[in-house]
Amino acid sequence: MSAVLLSPESINDLTLERLRHMTEQELLAIWSAAPAPALDELHGEYQSAMPMPIAERHDDFHHKYGLGEWIGKAFAPISHANFDGQGHNLCIKDGVVQRWMRFGTRIGSSIVDGRPALMMHYNAFDNLCAEPDLVDEIRKVRRSLYVAVCTMAANNELFGEVDPDTSRTPPLPFLLRGPFALWHGPDDPEFELRPQ
């Protein structure tokens, strides 16, 4: 399936909306076959989307824990600690865009399949995603369109239970498109920093 979906002809036909209506298994197949983007390729603010089969569950999870509506992620090739880049999430809460839940980025080997991916490590900062070791892994479908997976090292109602063989939850796919805006940076550059 992945070879057909990622043929040169069909790549140009893939859109965010088309990807959103695919199954988790189809998106994982595309992600498995896709290359890693260059670190500096993702620079600015990107629209996010969950695949339709899990979008409602994801939205319910965010609202249950007061995280607001997740609308995107932002990236910059600005080093932080031992990471080559950094970024944060974009959420709307009480009608205001919040830029927080930061992560460090680098090109590295996937936790899921060992191939190169743009790795996003939340434990680079001190936030609610750091302790369960949330890690996102981005690969490029085509220019301005990306598919990613996320896993964590703790049981979670959204991600599922940790697999004893991998010590991670099953990979959960999501999508990114953009950039739609320039890098703005987190609302509070001092927030979520770890003590030196």
Image (tube, helix red, strand yellow):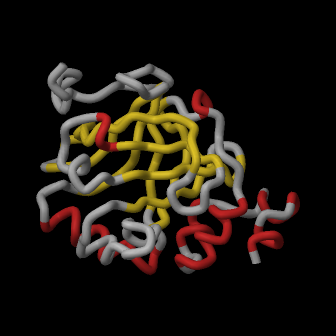
Q: Position of residue 5 (x, y in %)?
A: 77, 70
Say above or below: 168 vs 56.
above
Residue located 53% across and 37% down the image? 179
Please identify the quadrant where the N terminus is shown.
Answer: bottom right
**Percent coordinates x, y for residue 56 in the rendering:** 32, 75
Does residue 143 appear left or right of residue 164 in this picture? right
Number of marks drawn:
0
Q: Residue 59: percent from the left, percent from the top?
A: 28, 68
Q: In percent of the image, x 32 and y 43: which residue is there?
A: 122
Looking at the image, residue 94 sits to the left or right of residue 73; the answer is: left
Q: At 24% from the left edge and 50% from the top edge, which residue is drawn?
A: 129
Dividing the image into 4 quarters, which one contains the C terminus? Answer: top left
Image height check: is 89 above or below 192? below
Among the 4 quarters of the image, the one containing residue 74: top left
Asked whether 101 or 183 is in front, the reply is 101
> Does residue 182 appear to the left or right of 146 in the view shown?
left
Rendered residue at 16%/28% (across/down): 191
Residue nearer the viewer, 130 or 74: 130
In the rendering, at what x and y percent does residue 192 appear?
18, 32
Query: Observer-nearest residue: 187 or 113?
Result: 113
